[in-house]
Image: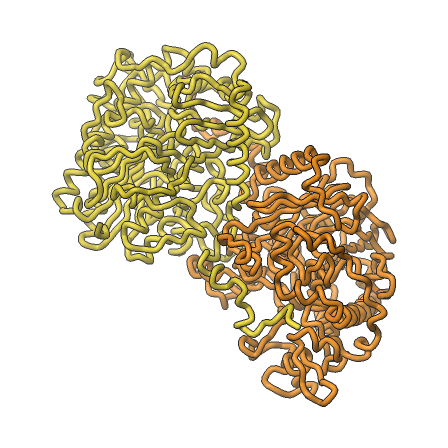
Chain colours: A yellow, B orange
Amino acid sequence: MGQVRNILFIMADQLRWDYLGCYGHPSLKTPNIDALADRGVRFTNAYAQSAICGPSRMSFYTGRYVTSHGSTWNQVPLSVGEWTLGDYLRPLGLHVALTGKTHMASDQAGMKRLGLDPNSPDGVLVSQCGFDAQPRDDGLHPDQSVNPDLAYNDYLRRQGYDGDNPWHDWANAAQGPDGEILSGWYMRNAAYPARVKAEDAETPWMTSQAIDYIRRQGESPWCLHLSYIKPHWPYMAPEPYFSMFGTEDVLPANRIDAEKKGPHPVVGAFMKHAEGQNFAREEVRETVIPAYMALIKQLDDEIGRLMGELEAMGRLDDTLIVFTSDHGDYLGDHWLGEKELFHDCSVKLPMIVSHPEGRKGAVDDHPVEAIDLIPTFIDAVGGKVPSHRLEGRSLMPLLKGEAVRDWREMAIAELDYSHRGARLTLGLGVNDCHGWMLRDARWKYIYYQGFRPQLFDLERDPDELHDLADDPGVSDVLAGFKEALFDWLAAGRNVRANLSDEDVEARTDTWQKKGVIFGEW
Amino acid sequence: MGQVRNILFIMADQLRWDYLGCYGHPSLKTPNIDALADRGVRFTNAYAQSAICGPSRMSFYTGRYVTSHGSTWNQVPLSVGEWTLGDYLRPLGLHVALTGKTHMASDQAGMKRLGLDPNSPDGVLVSQCGFDAQPRDDGLHPDQSVNPDLAYNDYLRRQGYDGDNPWHDWANAAQGPDGEILSGWYMRNAAYPARVKAEDAETPWMTSQAIDYIRRQGESPWCLHLSYIKPHWPYMAPEPYFSMFGTEDVLPANRIDAEKKGPHPVVGAFMKHAEGQNFAREEVRETVIPAYMALIKQLDDEIGRLMGELEAMGRLDDTLIVFTSDHGDYLGDHWLGEKELFHDCSVKLPMIVSHPEGRKGAVDDHPVEAIDLIPTFIDAVGGKVPSHRLEGRSLMPLLKGEAVRDWREMAIAELDYSHRGARLTLGLGVNDCHGWMLRDARWKYIYYQGFRPQLFDLERDPDELHDLADDPGVSDVLAGFKEALFDWLAAGRNVRANLSDEDVEARTDTWQKKGVIFGEW
């Protein structure tokens, strides 16, 4: 296959893999995203490196596992020394830009240590995870911390939405039955449509920003990370999308009573979180899920508009297009809300990759990971993948449909729940809260520091309702996975990231060439 | 105890822990180093984080395990994002300087990425492992790569030693019986004294540099890393030290024939290296070891001179003094030469710490590690130890003689032998060469990727001659150590290094205070 010129890396936020038509949702029609799947390869075993925004995205943007980049949860600063997507693609001639969310916390102390002015060109890049922000918008703008220069607020003001923080007062608010203003921060208000008009909501605004960027680039190569902030909560959907879905569209929760009785301690502690308690109630699911579906429906329409513009600009023939998410949303499944833990509805990703000359309409069940994208991008534009730093591998052979014999056997995800109330419930220190998931073709194994493991047989129990870890019949399976986790840890995360494997080969036993002689008589 | 003002951090290179009088060497008298031990605490279970210069030193200078800082072998660049000793002590008001060796390879690509000029003040610090070089001298200067501005060569020239590279022609050369010039690169030439005069050898030159620095500092606080390059090979000793030791001073090699029969595969591969083959010969030991002892004897005299100067300047009362090494030297023990592997003669360190108000003449058998020094320094000058980045702990309670109930149970060291011929002998890829040592009060457990473990019972076999790993009676011990290694790896090396534990505590479940509300009905 020839090389592409451009990369369009689209990410939705908190979009469940199974809330798309092409991934089998029975009532949510997403013809535009489905059309993208028809133009490319749809991966059915794609996993986030962590099922929460910050660490998941830092893995997407660094191409490294969470333990390797070290930013284990939201707002944990990414070291100034970590290389990101732009560091790999800029030298290959692409302009690397962002519209929307990264959730990256910059390493202010690290920049200060190196005398790097955060407002200098290099400092701005380091602060924006290596992206040229066009613009950045992480999506949550409480009055206490809203940026007075927030581009979306400027836009809303120009459209006539008033107030100091129109995002909060219009996009994240509804009007109640008696005319009262209701805050999107509270899930009960997802029962009402957002005050903002559909065309002024965040999703179309970001789409327009992306289209403008692509048009401005003309024939100059680019990589654009179009990073939508929806359908992430607050679950506020504008009309007409709001009214498209109702209680009848809410699928039954994937949960059984047995999961609540003697759950794994970590899972049990998460069930006690407010979001777990609330999503356990049908009223919450019936209120929130239609709004969540409405936000996805709007996203799908905007993907359609974007694809139409790309086609009109002639970009479909020279652009690699990825559509994915950073993690899912429990929505009450397994008696949980939000995300973070390792059930598929939380950690599994939709992942569609369309190469102009790649397979069309293909479905691929290889275990793929978020960290595979940077190698894929480098490969697609003709670069060489530096495997000593990047821990994923290019998907290009799978896009071509080549037989790949040595693909990884399992996908691996991690969690650091030190910031969460579950830690306090369990009485743990901040450094005792790490968990890992290993998922191979049949099993999902989960290991939390200090607790018994979990094991699900996804062949017989695809809904992950029956934790088999106490079953004496699976002790060999458990031991095998623990050994696999040991080997993965021992392989040395973060090791030798500044020296290539080829350099090690070339240097092995060769120092005498430089005149340094030792051990010789 | 009160705070100290200054820190004198003395390191010898490749000095075995047991080649000092105070550590029990029967014929090598080191009264000056012994006197330092009488002024402080002598640790009898101190370990390097890796038994080779580069990674060992990067652990000393970063306060982090090798897997955490990622510079796993000599010349593997230390990431520009890694904090070093100076970053911790400069904000506490100390000038942080180096005389001698660091073996640090700078992260040129990382500096370029951040637009950091290597010749700018911050760039120079990053390139010198955070030290102000006064001057740096890594000790090996083959003609092919000698720095034309090498300070020691300038010194030698001023003393009348001629040539383009007087280090090579005088300090690293001998005059043979027929007047021929013999290269110190070859161990057979350790049979002759160095051409340089004793007072112009590297050790006294570096000592003088250190004394000058301390004098220049006056009453201004400082931390000086006086990092000698001897007794590291080339084993060239000047007179009169050269003639102080002879064959009669060479201790019998600590080795038995059984070690050669069916050795552990990694150890066996190291035995095949040139240094292993050569040190297996008595001729080599009888030639090299007297020269090695002579270099240590000169070092001891220079420590005496340095202490005298410190006393004359009144610095003994306000200075914390450390004397240690970066690793040892097999010298033929276990049929091995050089270092890297995990026998005590290679990985165990001499470690003497003298605090003006601490215990005097104390002997301490707690397992301590190289990474404990930075926390000790911070603690000694009254700073707060950032435990999220620094992985060791302050030795101050041990210096005071406090009862410490929760001290670590084992010391941990690592090895990446990917650059060595052993890898080729074993037919391994560059990422399959990691090893670990766990040493508790009784046992030493060693795990190499892809091979059986090793186990020594140091109570019954302090000479480490009998590998018990195949003994069915120790299977529980082996399983326990493997679990301990798993837990250590799982604890998350390099995790959350840019956010303090206190910040995590303060942030746990508190985002609602910032106006971000989720999961609430």
- Give the quarter of the image for residue A399: top left
- B26 horizontally vs B349: left or right: right
| For residue B31, above or below residue A384 | below
Q: Residue at x 72, y 82 (%)?
A: B196
Q: Residue at x 53, y 72 (%)?
A: A514
Say if residue B286 shows up in the picture. Answer: yes
- Expressed as whole percent of the image width and height from the top left, the position of residue A106 reads 45, 45
Q: Residue at x 43, y 15 (%)?
A: A278
Q: Residue at x 57, y 53 (%)?
A: B416
- Expressed as whole percent of the image width and height from the top left, the position of residue A118 reads 44, 52
- Give the quarter of the image for residue A182: top left
- The C terminus of chain B is located in which quarter? top left
Say if residue A186 shows up in the picture. Answer: no
| For residue B153, above or below residue B66 | below
- Expressed as whole percent of the image width and height from the top left, the position of residue B383 reads 68, 48
- Expressed as whole percent of the image width and height from the top left, the position of residue A446 reads 50, 28
- B233 horizontally vs A264: left or right: right
